[in-house]
Amino acid sequence: MYNKKSDYAINKRNPDAIVYTDADKNEVKLTRDCFESEEEFLRWKAWSDAEYKQAEKNGRGYYDHTVALIDDADTYGETLEDELFALADKLEHDEKCAAIVAQIREVLTETQFRRLWLYCVCRKSEQEIADMEGVTQQSISISIRDTKKKISKIFGFDKKTPCKKP
């Protein structure tokens, strides 16, 4: 990105013209047609580029130690404030989820909770859970189904809320 107010940057970005700002802050372009020959244009273009570069270099000492204010803040994405609000929302959501999990854990047996956790959160298949516990897949399936029913009755969830395999 370049400084849109820099005479050097504006002039350099227009290779077919010498660009400068007049006293009324209007941008003026001297094209090749304004000169008698190509050589004369190139000589003055090289001179203007060098002159603007030196002027910019001389004025940079102050600006190298400052932070530029930009015209379009949206180009930089989220602000710090947006990030903080998003973090606060996530923390609030996480706290609510933790409270719900704690309530569910209170009404389930350790085995029911473990199987439901492995199935819903860890995304293990019924067969994988059965292999880990050394039981049949059918017993895991029945256990998870009964656990979901128990949660639905106690908390009033609809059938799809507690856990749905993708």
Image: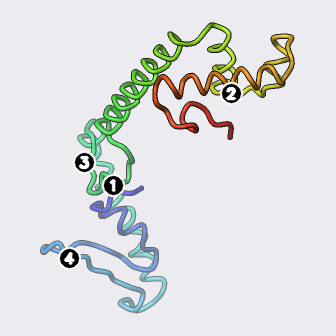
- Secondary structure state at the residue bearing disc 3: loop
**Relative vertical location of residue 24 with respect to residue 73 in this rendering, above or below:** below
Number of marks in the image?
Answer: 4
Which class describes the residues within 10 Å of circle 1: few (<14), some (14-19), or many (20+)? few
Which residue shows up at 68% across the image and 27% down it?
A: 145
- Secondary structure state at the residue bearing disc 4: loop
| 132 vs 9, nearest the viewer | 132
Instruction: Report the Cα–Cα distance between label 1 and label 4.
Output: 22 Å
Whichever of labels 1 and 3 marks the residue nearer the N terminus, that label is: 1
Instruction: Report the Cα–Cα distance between label 3 and label 2.
Output: 59 Å
Q: Which of the labelled discs sits on residue 69, or is there none?
A: 3
| 2 vs 126, nearest the viewer | 126
- Dots 3, 4 in contact, CB < 8 A: no
Nearer to us of marks 2 and 4 is 2
Instruction: Report the Cα–Cα distance between label 3 and label 4.
Output: 22 Å
Which residue shows up at 28% across the image and 52% down it?
A: 70
**Relative vertical location of residue 31 with respect to residue 46 in this rendering, above or below:** below
Residue on which disc 2 sits: 145
Tell me which amino acid carries mark 1.
Answer: Gln
Residue on which disc 1 sits: 54
Please tell me in which quadrant of the rendered image residue 139 appears: top right
Which quadrant of the rendered structure holds the C terminus?
Answer: top right
| 61 vs 77, nearest the viewer | 77
Which residue of the protein is positioned furthest toward the top in this rendering? Answer: 110
Please tell me in which quadrant of the rendered image residue 130 appears: top right
Please tell me in which quadrant of the rendered image residue 8 appears: bottom left
- Dots 3, 2 in contact, CB < 8 A: no
Which class describes the residues within 10 Å of circle 4: few (<14), some (14-19), or many (20+)? few
Which quadrant of the rendered structure holds the N terminus?
Answer: bottom left
Which residue shows up at 42% across the image and 82% down it?
A: 41
Left/right placement of residue 18 relative to residue 110 reads: left
Percent across and percent down for residue 56 are 31, 54
